[in-house]
Amino acid sequence: MNSDVIRLYAEIIELYEKPKVPSGELGHNVKGHTYDFSNVDPEATSCRGLIDIGILDVKHPN
């Protein structure tokens, strides 16, 4: 049995459907690359959510 496993509980604050292909003119990212969305269905969507995990209690090594 692994001892490095955690269980995370969260509350969903927002949940919405978003298109997979951005609309409008595409620019470059920080490294100067552009993304190719030609192989993605323009009608495809995905779900995006915002969650609240509460106060995180993390033990500092010092």
Image: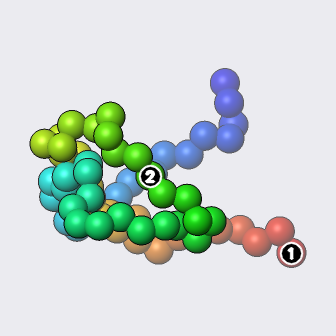
Task: List x then y, in percent, for residue 24.
Answer: 23, 66
Q: Nearer the viewer, mark 1 or mark 2?
A: 2
Are circles 1 and 2 on residues that touch, CB within 8 Å? no
| Labels 1 and 2: the sequence-earlier one | 2
At a point 35% along the width and 58% down the height, the residue shown is 10
Rendering coords of residue 47 (x, y %): 22, 49
Image quadrant occupied by the N terminus? top right
Q: Amino acid at mark 2?
A: Tyr
Rendered residue at 29%/67% (across/down): 25
Q: Secondary structure at mark 2?
A: loop
Is residue 61 rendered to the left or right of residue 50? right
Asked if one can make out residue 12 in the rendered structure from this viewpoint, the answer is no
CA gap, disc 1 to disc 2?
43 Å
Which residue is under mark 2? 35
Residue 10 horizontal side relative to residue 47, left or right: right
Q: Is residue 10 above or below residue 38?
A: below
Q: Quadrant of residue 32?
A: bottom right
Task: Determine whether 25 is above or below 9 in the image.
Answer: below
Q: Is residue 36 left or right of residue 29?
A: left
Q: Which mark is residue 62?
A: 1
Q: Nearer the viewer, residue 13 or 61?
A: 13
Q: Amino acid at mark 1?
A: Asn
Q: Nearer the viewer, residue 59 or 30?
A: 30
